[in-house]
Image (cartoon, rainbow, N blue to C red):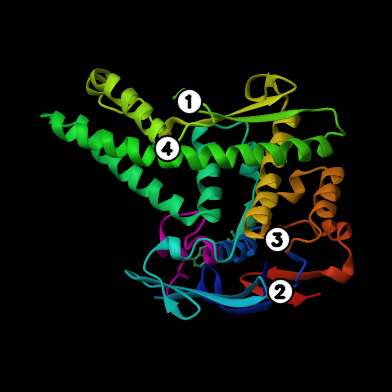
Amino acid sequence: MRLRNLQLVNFRNYNNLHLEFNEKVNLLVGKNGQGKTNIVESIYMLSFGKSFRTNKDRELIKFDTENLYVGGNFSKHNTNGLIEVAIGKNKKGIKVNKIHIQKIQELLGNLNVVIFSPEDLRLVKEGPKERRAFIDKEISQIMPKYYNYLTSYNKILFQKNKLLKSNYIDEALLDVYDESLAQYGSYIYILRRDFIKKIANISIELHKKLTNNIEDLSITYKNQINVSDEDTVSTIYTRFLEKLVSSRKHDIETRTTRYGIHKDDLNIFINDLDVRLYGSQGQQRTASISLKLSEIELINKEVGEYPVLILDDVFSELDETRQRLLVSNLSVVQMFITTAEISHKNIFDKENTTIFNIDKGQVINIE
Ligand code: ATP
Ligand code: MG
């Protein structure tokens, strides 16, 4: 998968920008606050229809202007596509190949993008919420209908919790909510189970490579229901519903929902020890890198092409051995790398690299 070019109008600190990209490495170099992340943020928009930094679209519109535009031509499976996002004060439109899309899942999966930022290096160390967000984003990219299930589930969960907090609790309505939660929960469970199994298989190998065969990384699905891998969606539905019903009294007392896929997590072990509890900083970071890189391999396996990779500020957080390992392992992947440190240039071979020097919302020089 390749992003061929990018057109920005009134996006963040850019007036009007057109860039043609390298098929391999694109280095975005500049001092702090000049607009490096803004460029990769716009690339991310083409994949997900929103920013990874904010949920407020209007923050993306250049100060003192009304509308922004982001457009990019990409190629995938030897065909070309065009994605365009336009945002005004109270409106937003997304087009794929000149056709307006109605729902975000029609956009997801067109241009696959994986972003790796310093927060991702803390993926293992952080709480379950961050790991769930990781899982959700990745499955949505590979399987856009997952995003539907999740949105429906979250909506119902929100309504149920609202009801639990109200003065009068209609139990018949709680029944309806619980049935829906069990239904969407079981679809989500199955897709998560499959995804985690696949990512675990890939990451164990990658982690061996990154640690010279010293460490065995094991990743499993941490959830609240006891089912075997062979169980089907109807068994899982039944199990979820049992859990919800058994917890009814507790839910009413605590005014919140105790069981469900909104509590899931990953178990991450190295050589049989829980990395979150017993791992060193370095081990936690390396495990995070393994997980993140597995995602790239998995997209390649599922979609048949590697995603575009964004490394935002992550490069300077890695030691040189890991930098080189990363680059050599991903030589087939198109990369966008932001860095304030010019010295990183030396890691890349000149032939396959384009350097964009960025200063105050302008690309002042291309090498
Ligand atoms: P760092 O190396 O610190 O990460 P960066 O080059 O990645 O820096 P960006 O985050 O891309 O920096 O850009 C930040 C700049 O963009 C800031 O100077 C900020 O004022 C400007 N900026 C952010 N949003 C807008 C906006 N809506 N309109 C105009 N300028 C904006
Ligand atoms: Mg930045």
Circle 3 is placed at which residue position? 31
> What span is in magenta?
45-65
Residue 131 in the image: x percent, y percent?
Answer: 55, 37
For the residue marked with disc 2, what is the amino acid?
A: Phe
Tell me which label, 4 or 3, sits earlier in the chain. Answer: 3
Report x, y in % for residue 197.
61, 37
For the residues carrying marks 1 and 2, which lies nearer the camera in this image? Answer: 1
Tell me which amino acid carries mark 3.
Lys
In reply to whether residue 173 is colored magenta, the answer given is: no
Compared with residue 333, is residue 250 higher up or lower down, i.e. above or below?
A: above
Gap in Å between the C-alphas at discs 4 and 1? 11 Å
Instruction: State yes or no: residue 59 in magenta.
Output: yes
**Relative to residue 48, is residue 121 drawn left or right?**
right
The disc, 1 or 3, on the residue closer to the chain's N-terminal end is: 3
The residues bearing labels 4 and 2 have C-alpha atoms spaced at a distance of: 44 Å
The residue singled out by tag 1 in the image is: 227
Q: Nearer the viewer, residue 365 or 88?
A: 88
Residue type at mark 1 is Val
* Quarter-of-image position of residue 331: bottom right
Question: Pointer 1: residues within 10 angstroms few (<14), some, or many (20+)?
Answer: few
Residue labelled with disc 2: 21
Q: Which secondary structure lies at badge 1?
A: loop
Q: Are marks 1 and 3 in contact (CB under 8 Å)?
A: no
Between 284 and 38, which is closer to the camera in this rendering?
284
